[in-house]
Each structure stands twice: as structure tokens, then as C-alpha cells.
Image (tube, rainbow, N blue to C red):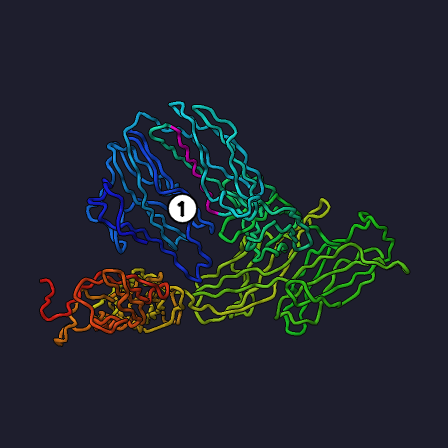
């Protein structure tokens, strides 16, 4: 927006009455950043100040989307949004600056009377990306006065849980005992639903002071990561010159903790349930677990689990309605597992953590102690299953017997789809073992369940809840000259040590090669491509009814060959454009020779926009020279993003280099003079469009009276100097144009606005200025 004249006599702008006033707002509209609203400036851009008195102004910016705002001083602008030549900031007795976070413009302090124009730039950010910009050009009238401005109290920032009431009072004073008018400005007062908006009232006033009451009944939908800013503007009623004090404070609305968390233990898992919070601005929940009950020191201004706690995030859900989670991750009997839930809002805000809910896996009946592979064979294999003799005397329901054990098996590692494989009648429960025979133990795993029934005639029922236990197998992960062995199982006892056996190809027997007290073992010094076979023996225990039962279980066998899976190091990529040759030049090297000794080639990837997908555009073979170069001429413009990977002799591909981007050279230009006089030279107004990468424009050319004389979408412009309405040649003179240039950029098609003048000479007697 621009206006032909400013006020007369502005000190900071030479000959101000002849200088255009202009301000500009930029709003990026992009489906990748979702809905976006321009921030609103709620405070008027006109204030008064006194010589020698500190002056403060705050624009009262409010962004309804909760985007982050930053503030800085800038230069006042004239026509076409260009900076004013010889513009100067106002003279100060100390300093002039803008608080980059709160937006307070502080002038400490004016040294002379007059009119002063000061400009402020307000930038809008989302997820670290600038998505908008507002320019404020304000006028401050400075006077000589004995008056002193009122004094606002220092108000602290507030953090409050959504749904809570904020209610407090504060008093503004005036050193000259003037009456005071106080105004509060900010987003909380602009909420359309007045029941959910903030309010302030004057509850006491007399010469020299005013007391204000602030009330805001917050709502869950108002919770967001960015704080709400409140500006307090107090004005005295001094008859000759009213002065102002402006201060600000911030309110952070935190998301409440999810409620009613309940943990329900099973034999091998713990189920969690909680209530859906009010509101619809939640994208999901985080699940956190600790191995004991832990109090948390909750910061009222910080959501989520506090850093440094012993809680570990073990999972998440992806919907506001998904309020159930089943934990099956590395649970051990006897451990008191404690959980907390954190809601995640659409803007990334984490709620307060829920109250703690704890649970201990309970033993089933009968309690299993073994599922050991005692014979390896594709058809005659055997697995030994054992359990502890059940304590019938602990049951609340009488079970006089006789009894029956029912043995179930499944090849589902998660304990699903069990099938009955045997029934064992037992008069005194002394039978506590079973050997599963004639099965293929070269495949794995197997899961077992033992049910105990009271088998009294006419009174048959399942006694208590059974539990499951799986056989163990070595899960193998090959790498170059090494194999990592992990111990896959799902058991109700605790394994404390693993003995690792590897087949000796000379004797065809398994020899012990080491042990570990952790959940994995790395066998090193192997030969790539040669197959190795492993078996594991595990020692452990479980405690039941005050007694400890030791366990010993053999695993299945598994075999694999080490392979070179080590990826080469990522190259170090640099990028530059040669605009005159219309080419981008990529240069890279590999400085870490320890993981690049067998690199055979490099792959080059490219995408034309930030939101596009990388595609391979070329390869370069390795050589003894550590430096490599690749040239690329993009199909549309020089803009784009590149990455390079290294490929070794085993066809392992390194991670891509960090994505390196550059924008197009923006070569589209317009001349500032042309001579449509039919002399065969410079008769047409044409653009400079190297590579023809600009495909569309919106060009509007006006005469000195503001009448449109030419318009086109042709990027070549091709104006012959004729008025598009009369079809006659225009007269010699200066013409103003606005050209929206639709350029392919990294973020997609963006508009670059060219605003300037073109000098038109339509007569052969007219000559361009030398």
C-alpha cells in the first residue's frame, strides 16, 4: 500500500511531504504449511512522547494460528516499497531498539521535539520457516513538557493449565497525580466467543492511580506452544500533553494432562487406558515408562516429561481417539513398571504428563520355568516344558480335584492361535513337566501355554489364568566380518547369562565361544561369505511365593554368513551456480578413508523443489583423485537440491550427503528505457529471460495519471509502445510498471514483484539520456 505524500516536517525523512508513504505485507500461501492467517496489529501506529522521557510502543501483534513472531527495526519506505534515501533513525540520549521477542519499541529517550517516523519489521515463523512479514511505519510526535508519563507495574509472565481461570489486579500510578486511562490490548480480547475471551475492568480510580482487574477463563482449544502477548497501554490526562507508558506480559496456555490413566497387568504385557481430553487439537499421545515409581518436578511452563528423568518413551499413538496402548516391550516379572501419558497438540505442544500408574506382571497358574530345545531335528525334535507345582491353597475358590493339565502350542511368537497338543490327568499336581516330541526344531519359535483345570465330576472349571512361554532362538544380524547375536524369546522369567555356542566345522559340534550378561553378543573376526551356525544356553530365575526357581533353557539353532554391510562415509558436498553458463557445479570429497577404502562410484541425486522427491541424475566412477566434480543443467531453472552417495564394492550405498540447495539465478530483468520510433533499434520493450525459465508474468504499465496503458502475461512483454485502449502510440515520458513474475523456486512457483519506471521515447528527435 502506498500514499503519494507523508506529513510535512518529519525529522527523520528529508522533505517528507514530497515522499511517498508505503507499507507492505507478505503472506505465503502454500498447502505444505496448512492454513495461514496474517497477524493483526491491535495497537494504533500513532503516539506522543516528551523530550527526555523514555518512550515505549508495542504494536500488539496477535497471530490466531499461534505462529511465532519476531521484531526488528527497519527503514521507512517510499514508492514501490523502496528504502527512503537519507532516512535516519531518531536521535537518542541513550538507545533506540526493539525487543525481538516481545516487540517493545524502546526510545531512551527523545532529545528534541518534532515528528518522527519509525518503522518496524514483524516476521512470522512456523517450524523455523518464515511464512509472512508485516511492515509497521508509525509516527511519534515529541513535545517539550513538564509532564511525566504514568508508570505501569512490572507484570510477570503467566503459565496456566487450559480451563483454569486467570484473575488478578494491578495498579498503574502517575507521578504527577494525573488521572489515568488504562487499555489492555492482545489476542485474548479478540476471541469472537466472548465467553472464552479475556476481559478487563477498572475497579478503582483516583488522581494518581488506576486499578485494573484482568479475568480470563481459558479454554482447552486455546492451548498452544506460542504465548499470548498482552499489551498494557496507560495514558495520563495531563491537559497539554498526554503521555503513555506501555508494557507487556505473556500468557502461556498449557495443555492439561490426560486423565484416568489405568494400567492392567497380564502375564507378559501391561495394558494402558486413559480418557480423551476435551478439545480437538490433539494429534496423538506419547507413552513413557520407568522401572519404579518416580515423582516428577513439573514446570508449569514446560510440557512433556522433564529432561533428566528416568522415564523413557516406549511408544505413541497417532489419533486423539487412540487412548489404548499395550506394552509388551522387554517386560520382566517382579518389576514395578510405572507409566505416564503426554498428549501432543497439532502445533507440537506437549501437555503436562499424566499422573503415574504402575503395575507388576502377575504370575499365571501354573507358573512356567522352562521351554528348552533339548533336541534339534527337522522332524524328531524335542522341547522340554516345565512349571512350578501350583499352590491350590492360595485360591479363593475351592478346587478339590482331581486335576488336569492341558498343554497348548503355537508357532506364533506373540502367543496367538494356540492348539491343544496334550492332556495330563493329575491327582496331586505332582506332574510339572512335559516333553513335546516329533516336531521340527530347526524352525522357530514355539510358544507354550499350560492350563490347569479342576476336574471334579460336575464341577469342571479353569483354575486361575495361565501364562505363556516361548522357546528361544538366536536372532542373527550379519555385518562385515562379524555377526551380532540377539536372544529372541517371550518368557515370564528373567535370564541373567547367555552362553554362546558356534558349530565347529571340523568336529560338527557346538563349541562355547563366549558369554554375555546383556541381550546381545557380537562374534568378531569372521570371514565374509562363510556360513556360521549358533546355539545359546540361558541361565535365569524367577521368584514365586518367596522362593527362587532357577532356570536353564537351550535355544534353537540359527545360521548365517557375515557380509559387508558397512556403508561408506557420506561425501562432503559443496555446490555453486555458474549463471552465465547455465550450469550448477557439484564438488565433493571423502575425507574419512577408514570407511571409503573400497568405494567404486558415486551417485548424484536431484530434485527441483523443496517438496519434490530426489531422483538419480548421474554417476561418477571413483578414482585416485580425492576430489570429484559433476556439472548439471536443470531442465527448468538453476534452482534445486542435490545429494551425493558413495557406493562400495559390495554395493553398499552410503547415507546421502546433507541436502544442499540453491535457488535459481533470478535472471529475469526488464529494461528501463526503449524507443518505439520505428527506426529498427530498440522499438519493442522486451524482457531478458535467460533459459526461458519464467513461463508467466502479470505485467501492468501505467502512465503518470495512473491509467493502465498496457497489460500482458507474456514473459517476453513485447510492448510496442501503443496504448492498449486507443491502439495509438503513447507519448514520450516516464511510465510506471508493476510486474508479478511467476518464478520456479525451491518452494514451488513464487511471485517476485518488479516495480519501477520505464522511459519511453516515441519520436526520433527524442534521445535517451546519456
Span shown in magenta: 225-237
Q: Please check the rendered image and state whether residue 233 is part of the magenta-colored stretch, yes or no.
A: yes
Relative depth, front residue between 645 and 543: 645
Give the image location of residue 503, x and y in percent: 54, 67
Whether residue 588 is visible, yes or no, is no
Relative depth, front residue between 555 and 660: 660
The image quarter in which residue 131 lies: bottom left
Relative depth, front residue between 636 and 591: 636
Q: Residue at x 34, y 65 (%)?
A: 643
560 relative to 551 in the view: left or right: left
Q: Residues within 10 Å of mark 1 (few under 14, many from 20)?
A: some
Q: Is 178 situated above or below 59?
A: above
322 relative to 397 in the view: left or right: left
Q: Residue at x 44, y 50 (%)?
A: 67
Q: Is 762 situated above or below 60?
A: below
Relative depth, front residue between 280 and 45: 45
Residue linked to disc 1: 41
Q: Is 11 situated above or below 499?
A: above
Q: Residue furthest right?
A: 458
The image quarter in which residue 694 lies: bottom left
Where's the N terminus, which quadrant? bottom left
Q: Residue at x 78, y 52 (%)?
A: 390
Q: Please check the rendered image and state whether residue 281 is part of the magenta-colored stretch, yes or no.
A: no
- Magenta stretch secondary structure, dominant: strand
Give the image location of residue 15, x and y in percent: 20, 45
Where's the C terminus, which quadrant? bottom left
Tally of numbered discs: 1
Q: Residue at x 42, y 61 (%)?
A: 30
Whether residue 449 is visible, yes or no, is yes
237 relative to 307 in the view: left or right: left
Amino acid at each position: 500500500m502506498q500514499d503519494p505524500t507523508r506529513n510535512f516536517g518529519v525529522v527523520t525523512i528529508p522533505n517528507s511531504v514530497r515522499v511517498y508513504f508505503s507499507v507492505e505485507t507478505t503472506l505465503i500461501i502454500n498447502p505444505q504449511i496448512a492454513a495461514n492467517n496474517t497477524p493483526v496489529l491491535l495497537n494504533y501506529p500513532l503516539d506522543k512522547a516528551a523530550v527526555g522521557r523514555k518512550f515505549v510502543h508495542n504494536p500488539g501483534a496477535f497471530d490466531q494460528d499461534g505462529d511465532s513472531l519476531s521484531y526488528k527495526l527497519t527503514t521507512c519506505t517510499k514508492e514501490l516499497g523502496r528504502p527512503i534515501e537519507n532516512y535516519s533513525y531518531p536521535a537518542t540520549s541513550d538507545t533506540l531498539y526493539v525487543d525481538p521477542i516481545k516487540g517493545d519499541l524502546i526510545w531512551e529517550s527523545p532529545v528534541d521535539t518534532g515528528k518522527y517516523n519509525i518503522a518496524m519489521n514483524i516476521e512470522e515463523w512456523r517450524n523455523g520457516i518464515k511464512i509472512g512479514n508485516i511492515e509497521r511505519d508509525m509516527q511519534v510526535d515529541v513535545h517539550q513538557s513538564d509532564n511525566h508519563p504514568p508508570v505501569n507495574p512490572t507484570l510477570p509472565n503467566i503459565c496456566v493449565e487450559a480451563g483454569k481461570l486467570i484473575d488478578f489486579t494491578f495498579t498503574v500510578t502517575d507521578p504527577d497525580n494525573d488521572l489515568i486511562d488504562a487499555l489492555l490490548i492482545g489476542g485474548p480480547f479478540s476471541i469472537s466467543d466472548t465467553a472464552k475471551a479475556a476481559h478487563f475492568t477498572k475497579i478503582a480510580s483516583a488522581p494518581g492511580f488506576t486499578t485494573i482487574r484482568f479475568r480470563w477463563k481459558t479454554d482447552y482449544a486455546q492451548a498452544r506452544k506460542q504465548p499470548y502477548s498482552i499489551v498494557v497501554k496507560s495514558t495520563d490526562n495531563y491537559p497539554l500533553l498526554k503521555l503513555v507508558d506501555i508494557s507487556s506480559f505473556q500468557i502461556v496456555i498449557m495443555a492439561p494432562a490426560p486423565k484416568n490413566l489405568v494400567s492392567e497387568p497380564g502375564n507378559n504385557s501391561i495394558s494402558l487406558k486413559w480418557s480423551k481430553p476435551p478439545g480437538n487439537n490433539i494429534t496423538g499421545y506419547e507413552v513413557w515408562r520407568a522401572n519404579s515409581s518416580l515423582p516428577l518436578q513439573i514446570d508449569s511452563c514446560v510440557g512433556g516429561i522433564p529432561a533428566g528423568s528416568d522415564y523413557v518413551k516406549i511408544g505413541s499413538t497417532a489419533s486423539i481417539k487412540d487412548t489404548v496402548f499395550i506394552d509388551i516391550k522387554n517386560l520382566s516379572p517382579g518389576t514395578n513398571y510405572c507409566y505416564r501419558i503426554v498428549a501432543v497438540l497439532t502445533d507440537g505442544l506437549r501437555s503436562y504428563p499424566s499422573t503415574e500408574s504402575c503395575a507388576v506382571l502377575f504370575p499365571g497358574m501354573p507358573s512356567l520355568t522352562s521351554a528348552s530345545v533339548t533336541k534339534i531335528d527337522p522332524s524328531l525334535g524335542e522341547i522340554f516344558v516345565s512349571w512350578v507345582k501350583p499352590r491350590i491353597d492360595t485360591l479363593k475358590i475351592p478346587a478339590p480335584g482331581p486335576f488336569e493339565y492341558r498343554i497348548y502350542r503355537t508357532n506364533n511368537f506373540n502367543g496367538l492361535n494356540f492348539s491343544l497338543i496334550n492332556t495330563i490327568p493329575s491327582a496331586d499336581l505332582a506332574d510339572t513337566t512335559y516333553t513335546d516330541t516329533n516336531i521340527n526344531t530347526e524352525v522357530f519359535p514355539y510358544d507354550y501355554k499350560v492350563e490347569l483345570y479342576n476336574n471334579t465330576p460336575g464341577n469342571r472349571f479353569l483354575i486361575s489364568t495361565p501364562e505363556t512361554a516361548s522357546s528361544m532362538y538366536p536372532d542373527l544380524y550379519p555385518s562385515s566380518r562379524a555377526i551380532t547375536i540377539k536372544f529372541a524369546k517371550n518368557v515370564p522369567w528373567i535370564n541373567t547369562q547367555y552362553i554362546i555356542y558356534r558349530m565347529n566345522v571340523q568336529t560338527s559340534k557346538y563349541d562355547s565361544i563366549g558369554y554375555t550378561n546383556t541381550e546381545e553378543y557380537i562374534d568378531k573376526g569372521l570371514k565374509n561369505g562363510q556360513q556360521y551356525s549358533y546355539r545359546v544356553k540361558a541361565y535365569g530365575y524367577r521368584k514365586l511365593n518367596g522362593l527362587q526357581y532357577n532356570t536353564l533353557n537351550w535355544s534353537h539353532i540359527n545360521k548365517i554368513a557375515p557380509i559387508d554391510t558397512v556403508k561408506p562415509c557420506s561425501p562432503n558436498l559443496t555446490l555453486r551456480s555458474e549463471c552465465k553458463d547455465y550450469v550448477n557445479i557439484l564438488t565433493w570429497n571423502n575425507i574419512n578413508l577408514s570407511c571409503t577404502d573400497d568405494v567404486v562410484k558415486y551417485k548424484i541425486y536431484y530434485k527441483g523443489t523443496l517438496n519434490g522427491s530426489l531422483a538419480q541424475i548421474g554417476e561418477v566412477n571413483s578414482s585416485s583423485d580425492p576430489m570429484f566434480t559433476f556439472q548439471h543443467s536443470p531442465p527448468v531453472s538453476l534452482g534445486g537440491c542435490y545429494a551425493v552417495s558413495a557406493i562400495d564394492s559390495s554395493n553398499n550405498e552410503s547415507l546421502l550427503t546433507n541436502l544442499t540447495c540453491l535457488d535459481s539465478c533470478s535472471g529475469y530483468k526488464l529494461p528501463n528505457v526503449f524507443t518505439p520510433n520505428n527506426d529498427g533499434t530498440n522499438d519493442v520493450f522486451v524482457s531478458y529471460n535467460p533459459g526461458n525459465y519464467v513461463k508467466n508474468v502479470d505485467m501492468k504499465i501505467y502512465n503518470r495519471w495512473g491509467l493502465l496503458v498496457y497489460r500482458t502475461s507474456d514473459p517476453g512483454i513485447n510492448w510496442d509502445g501503443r496504448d492498449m485502449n486507443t491502439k495509438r502510440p503513447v507519448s514520450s515520458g516516464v511510465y510506471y510498471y508493476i510486474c508479478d513474475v511467476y518464478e520456479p523456486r525451491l518452494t514451488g512457483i513464487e511471485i517476485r514483484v518488479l516495480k519501477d519506471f520505464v522511459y519511453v521515447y516515441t519520436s526520433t528527435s527524442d534521445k535517451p539520456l546519456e
